[in-house]
């Protein structure tokens, strides 16, 4: 379970719902991007990022103490997840995760300016 409450229910959002909502938002909001984006590639980026975040643990925007160790938790999670894949798939997933984290492409920047308001993930 994530920290985000659902508007239409009295429970918190789960990881699958979060990822599904995120992928759907990419499909619906891509046309409003400041830069043209490849929707398929953007969906891949956000889903790989979410997979790592699921294993690293949800870091709510308001939890500055958890944010201190977030990168280390995410790196350990990425290493563990990608480490069980065949080498070619591991490299591809690692490259997607790093592209998202570094925001070096329009697709990676589409997720928002970073932590805080406007960030899809």
Image: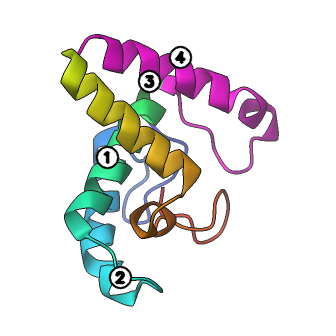
**Residue pictured at 44% horizontal, 65% vertical:** 7
Q: Nearer the viewer, mark 2 or mark 4?
A: 2
* Left or right placement of residue 83 versus residue 88 in this view: right
Badge 1 or badge 3: first in the primary sequence: 1
Asked if residue 60 is among those painted magenta in the image, a careful observer would answer yes
Q: Which mark is residue 78?
A: 3
Marks 1 and 3, how far apart in space?
13 Å
Marks 2 and 4, how far apart in space?
32 Å
Q: Nearer the viewer, mark 1 or mark 2?
A: 2
Q: Secondary structure at mark 2?
A: loop
Assess whether mark 3 and mark 4 are in contact (beta carbons under 8 angstroms). yes
**Residue at image mark 4:** 76
Assess whether mark 2 and mark 3 are in contact (beta carbons under 8 angstroms). no
Q: What's the coloring here?
A: rainbow
Which stretch did the figure color magenta?
56-85
Q: Few, some or many C-alpha atoms within 10 Å of disc 2 (few <14, some 14-19, many ≥20)?
A: few
Q: Few, some or many C-alpha atoms within 10 Å of disc 1 (few <14, some 14-19, many ≥20)?
A: many
Picture coordinates of residue 60 (x, y %)?
64, 45
Q: Quadrant of the N terminus?
A: top left
Q: Quadrant of residue 69?
A: top right
């Amino acid at each position: 379970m994530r920290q985000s409450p659902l508007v239409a229910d009295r429970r918190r959002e789960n990881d699958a719902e979060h990822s599904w909502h995120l992928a759907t938002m990419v499909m619906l909001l891509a046309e409003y991007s400041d830069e043209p984006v490849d929707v398929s590639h953007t969906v891949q980026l956000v889903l790989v990022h979410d997979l790592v975040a699921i294993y690293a643990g949800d870091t709510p925007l308001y939890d500055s103490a958890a944010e201190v160790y977030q990168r280390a938790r995410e790196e350990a999670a990425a290493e563990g997840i990608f480490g069980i894949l065949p080498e070619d798939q591991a490299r591809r997933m690692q490259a997607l995760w790093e592209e998202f984290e570094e925001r070096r492409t329009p697709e990676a920047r589409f997720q928002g300016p970073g932590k805080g308001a406007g960030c899809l993930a």
